[in-house]
């Protein structure tokens, strides 16, 4: 990210500035260290390892579980010791050394207590929390009783049995689909987790959480740009909204400034505007690109989102407080188009089609100019859903011009991350969607949008820029020995996973220019220039080892990485030797 500061620059820093920077660095390191990462692939039918279980339980214990009467451990400790509100301590710790120490003190007590729980059980943990943080038994026992139950469920695994039952055509019980940390009641695994009632989307809980995320998102944009974005583009996926009961949907509704309303049959089919006096900010225009899975699973929700945009566009409000209305009116004036064309905001694939294909184009290196990737995204996703002003279903009508125009006003793009298990470099779908739409916006708006992601792991609905998220994923996973050694334990597949991470990282260069050059240098040093590592990769999976090296050469060739000439020569040699190995030469 930054090159080592020049000596004379260092000297010009005041002691306060130096302390501030050291503290910032300390907090960044802490963030990486504490990040929960998968340390290996899930093996079907096999319960998680003891060490993984302990990490998972620690994470679960850091969230309130009102349904089990359990509070987050950090809050119990900071309240017990009368240190204040933990979330506020964490926020202040970025700039205040005393607060950073207080945070460490709380975190240390939580860690020791969790260790006592894992080693010796509920009673030991309850006792420790009482002795070290004056937390009453009544408060701590529900937490550890819940953790004990979850721990037993983590040890059991009925996936194999459930699969056999499914193959025999038997009924598989439905369970909630969610991230374990966010909703431990998904356990035990081996149930049908994809049951969802779209008429209950978003749930009351999701709507409440959606408010915090959208507020943070807008606060972050304002802090960086001094005003609200005139329009945003959101990516909505089906599985995510199943897992979170519609948090992504809730975020879109909050940005528009509307709330969901149930009809006489208790189905969420209506929306109501939140008065501007309560909202206390303008309504943000949102362009939603939904996946094919979302379109198929959430048909009533698709209608709800379209209804929300149309409702807001028709509100009799000043344009400076209603950006949907402003943009729609402007569009109708500029291009002399009808209201229905100017108000289309819900886009997906043509009926029966899925995906953007941007990932395939990147993976196969089948592109010349970056803008082709954004154009492909629009070609695949320019089909409008919802109903026109006379109530007729649009049924996925091709609306390329309408989408181009809507994207031309977008200043920020965003996607919700709903789980710690899959991040933006684990699969190619994040860059295909969020990267694809960002590249499409860049050409149509003549400016690269600000690109954001949420962090489902943070208790305070943290928002990160894409660049920050790429760095965090790179440090916490791709370049983290704990992560890649975990992968290498899986042999052939593990090497493929490492290569996938490098290629997916490259996808963020291609679609969003969001990867610092040092990332490629360190990937090269870790996986190619280290002889013993290269030997391991090529003996386990020479195909993926070759692809990894080729991808690094492609990053250099396309100008995303200005590699040192000696390093480049070495990479070419390695690539050649891997080719020989694959062709059975030498
Ligand atoms: C979805 O859940 O909608 C989805 C999942 C993977 C890739 C793209 C979309
Ligand atoms: Mg560029």
Image: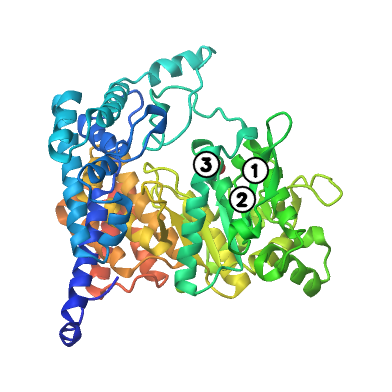
> Which residue is label 2 attached to?
253
**Other residues around mark 1 within 10 Å, as few (<14) / some (14–19) / many (≥20):** many
Where residue 124 sits in the image (x, y, percent)?
A: 14, 27
Determine the CA span between mark 2 and mark 1: 8 Å
**Other residues around mark 3 within 10 Å, as few (<14) / some (14–19) / many (≥20):** some
Instruction: Tell me the quarter of the picture where residue 237 sits.
Output: top right
Out of 533 and 347, give the one closest to the viewer. Answer: 347
Instruction: Tell me the quarter of the picture where residue 47 sits.
Output: top left
Q: Earlier along the polypeptide chain: callout 3 or callout 2?
A: 3
Residue 553 horizontal side relative to residue 10, left or right: right
Q: Is mark 2 within 8 Å of ligand 1?
A: no
Mark 2 lies on a secondary structure that is helix
Residue 354 horizontal side relative to residue 485, left or right: right
Tell me, yes or no, whether the two marked residues, 2 and 1, touch with CB atoms within 8 Å: yes
> Which residue is label 3 attached to?
206
Name the residue at 67% across, 40% down. Answer: 261
Name the residue at 23% across, 69% down. Answer: 567
Where residue 197 sits in the image (x, y, percent)?
A: 61, 30
Q: Does the residue labelled 3 lie within 8 Å of ligand 1?
A: no
Where residue 468 sits in the image (x, y, percent)?
A: 36, 62
> Which residue is label 1 attached to?
260
Tell me, yes or no, whether the two marked residues, 3 and 2, touch with CB atoms within 8 Å: no
The answer to whether residue 443 is above or below residue 262 is below
Mark 3 lies on a secondary structure that is helix
Tell me, yes or no, whether the two marked residues, 1 and 3, touch with CB atoms within 8 Å: no
Out of 161 and 548, give the one closest to the viewer. Answer: 161
Determine the CA span between mark 3 and mark 2: 11 Å
Residue 208 horizontal side relative to residue 475, left or right: right
């Amino acid at each position: 990210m930054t090159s080592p500061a020049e000596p004379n620059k260092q000297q010009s820093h005041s002691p306060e500035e130096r302390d501030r920077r050291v503290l910032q660095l300390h907090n960044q390191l802490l963030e990486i260290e504490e990040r929960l990462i998968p340390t290996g692939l899930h093996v079907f039918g096999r319960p998680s390892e003891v060490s993984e279980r302990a990490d998972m339980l620690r994470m679960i214990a850091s969230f309130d579980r009102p349904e089990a009467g359990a509070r987050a451990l950090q809050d119990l400790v900071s309240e017990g010791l009368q240190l204040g509100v933990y979330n506020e301590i964490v926020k202040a710790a970025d700039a205040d050394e005393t607060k950073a120490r207080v945070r460490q003190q709380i975190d240390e007590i939580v860690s020791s207590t969790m260790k006592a729980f894992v080693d010796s059980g509920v009673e030991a943990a309850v006792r420790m929390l009482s002795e070290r943080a004056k937390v009453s038994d009544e408060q701590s026992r529900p937490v550890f009783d819940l953790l004990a139950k979850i721990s037993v469920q983590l040890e059991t695994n009925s996936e194999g049995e459930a699969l056999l039952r499914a193959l025999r055509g038997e009924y598989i019980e439905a369970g909630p689909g969610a991230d374990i940390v966010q909703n431990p009641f998904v356990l035990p695994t081996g149930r049908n987790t994809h049951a969802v009632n779209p008429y209950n989307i978003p749930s009351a809980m999701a709507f409440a959480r959606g408010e915090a995320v959208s507020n943070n998102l807008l606060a972050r944009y304002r802090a960086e740009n001094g005003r609200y974005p005139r329009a945003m583009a959101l990516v909505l996926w089906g599985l995510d909204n199943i897992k979170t009961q519609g948090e992504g949907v809730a975020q879109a509704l909050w940005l528009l400034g509307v709330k969901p309303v149930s009809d006489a049959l208790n189905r969420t089919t209506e929306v109501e505007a939140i008065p501007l006096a309560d909202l206390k900010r303008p309504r943000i225009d949102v362009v939603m690109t939904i996946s094919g899975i979302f379109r198929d699973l959430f048909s009533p929700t698709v209608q709800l989102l379209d209804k929300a945009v149309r409702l807001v566009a028709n509100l009799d409000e000043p344009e400076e407080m209603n950006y949907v209305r402003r943009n729609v009116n402007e569009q109708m004036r500029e291009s002399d188009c009808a209201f229905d064309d100017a108000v289309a905001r819900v886009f997906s694939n043509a009926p029966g089609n899925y995906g953007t294909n941007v990932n395939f184009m990147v993976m196969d290196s089948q592109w010349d100019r970056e803008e082709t990737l954004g154009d492909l995204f629009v070609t695949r996703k320019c089909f409008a859903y919802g109903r026109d002003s006379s109530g007729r279903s649009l049924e996925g009508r091709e609306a390329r011009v309408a989408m181009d125009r809507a994207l031309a006003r977008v200043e920020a793009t965003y996607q919700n991350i709903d789980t710690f298990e899959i991040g933006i470099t684990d699969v190619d779908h994040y860059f295909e969607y969020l990267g694809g739409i960002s590249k499409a916006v860049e050409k149509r708006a003549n400016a690269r949008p600000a690109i954001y992601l949420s962090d489902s792991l943070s208790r305070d609905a943290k928002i990160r820029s894409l660049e920050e998220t790429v760095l965090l994923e790179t440090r916490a996973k791709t370049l983290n020995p704990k992560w890649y050694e975990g992968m290498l334990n899986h042999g052939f597949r593990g090497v493929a996973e490492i290569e996938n991470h490098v290629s997916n990282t490259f996808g963020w260069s291609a679609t969003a220019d969001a990867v610092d050059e040092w990332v490629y240098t360190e990937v090269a040093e870790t996986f190619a220039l280290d002889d013993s590592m290269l030997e391991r990769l090529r003996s386990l999976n020479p195909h993926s080892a070759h692809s990894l090296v080729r991808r690094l050469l492609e990053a250099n060739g396309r100008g995303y990485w200005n590699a040192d000439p000696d390093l480049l020569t070495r990479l070419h040699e390695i690539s050649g030797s891997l080719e020989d190995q694959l062709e059975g030469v030498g």
